[in-house]
Each structure stands twice: as C-alpha cells, then as structure tokens.
Image (tube, rainbow, N blue to C red):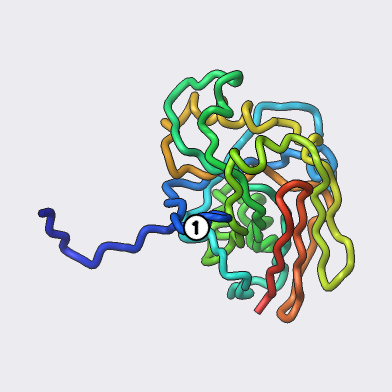
Amino acid sequence: MTEFAIEVPPVVALPIAGMDARFPVRRVYCIGRNYAAHAVEMGHDPDREPPFFFQKNPDNLDPSGQFPYPPHSSDVHHEAEIAVMLKSGGTNISPDRALDHVFGYALSLDMTRRDLQGAQKKMGRPWEIGKAFERSAPVGPIHTVASVGHPDSGSITLKVNGELRQEGDLNQMIWKVPEMIAYLSEYFELAPGDVILSGTPSGVGPVERGDRMDLAVEGLGAMTVSVV
C-alpha cells in the first residue's frame, strides 16, 4: 500500500443526472473566442483562425449552485457555455471518431475576473489569475450521451436577475465539439475524466453579489447560480 507524505487531495467528482455514480475530473480545457459574435465584442477578428485553449483546475468546477464573488476584482463576468465530458482519450484522434470519446454534456459557466484578465493580456502574460480562481466554473449535472445524444444545435441563453444577457445557438460554434477534441489530441494526450468548456456566445457582462444567473441550453435543461 502506497504511503503519502501529506493528506491526499480529494478527487473532484461531478453529479450525473439519473445516476448515483459520479464523474471524476482529470483536466479542464477551455476554448477561447469560439463564437464569432463574442470574438467581435472582445475586439478580435471572427474569421476562423486556429483555435486556442487555456486551462482551469479540476476543483474550479463547482456543482453547488453558488458562485462566491472572488477577491481582488471589481469586474467579474459571466460566460455561458456547455461542458463536454470525456470517457476515453488518446492522441491524434480523428474528427470522425472524436464523439466516440464523449461521456456526456453539462451546462457550465466560465466566470472571469475581466479586469485581471485584461491586465494580463496587456502584459502578454497567462490568464490563469483571471480564469482559474476558486469555484470559477459553476457546472450542472452531467447528461449522458445515451440520454441526450450529441447536441450540436439548440439555443443557449443566460439571464441575470431575469434580464436576458446572452443568447446564441450551439450551431454557431466556430470549432465544433469533434474538431476541438481532435485538435487538443494533437497537442495533449486526452484521457477519461477530461472536460472541455466549449466557448461562449456574445453578451458577456458583469455580475454583483446578490445576482441570480439562469443558464438554459435546449436539450440540456437549465441551472440557476447565485452570486454570493
């Protein structure tokens, strides 16, 4: 039996709709500017350029329904997304076989300390301080492929205190889910437990303590997250 020098960190494990078993998380990859309108609102050309990814930490994924407003920021933005959960992986996966590796899908938010991210961009530094902070990725229950298939179209909306902020369609993704999996597998060895956040439509904006965020995706249901 292996002995460890310190207490072993807990495995991050997410709820699965209709199952007692949970989904263990290995890595979290997030694609940037994957909707043309969002690329424009962030000041970038929406033409199809090679995708880029950043990472969050497994324990940033939080199914609690609460988002604690983080320190050292006064401009925290919501980004409505779906999360893709992998059941298997590998390298150099072909796009036509990529969906074979998907376990399921979930609603998710990529919460962003926009002021800190902006400062890092200006200095040419990594974004983690603006993206990978504690509980920065609220997530809903995972819906298995067996129950929902592979959603490649359908509305995605986010309301804050009942006001519609973000509205788009999954078919507006510049890089579709199979392409994201294939591209990542050229640079990383993907594995069971990996999660991919698929980008956000336009309309990102700030939240404050006390706000209520309602995210809905056609075919995947809805979730509510309170800013505390």
Q: Position of residue 124 (x, y in %)?
A: 60, 46
- Image height check: is 163 above or below 195? below
Indicate the amino acid at tag 1: Leu
Q: Residue at x 66, y 60 (%)?
A: 112
Pick the front one: 12 or 4? 12
Q: Residue at x 66, y 36 (%)?
A: 149
Q: Position of residue 67 (x, y in %)?
A: 62, 71
**Left or right position of 163 against 195:** right
**Furthest-right residue in this view:** 163
**Left or right position of 184 against 209:** left
Pick the front one: 122 or 144? 144
Q: Residue at x 55, y 49 (%)?
A: 126
User: Is residue 45 shown to the viewer in this render?
Assistant: no
Q: Which residue is mark 1?
A: 14
- Image height check: is 110 above or below 169? below
> Pointer 1: residues within 10 angstroms few (<14), some, or many (20+)?
some
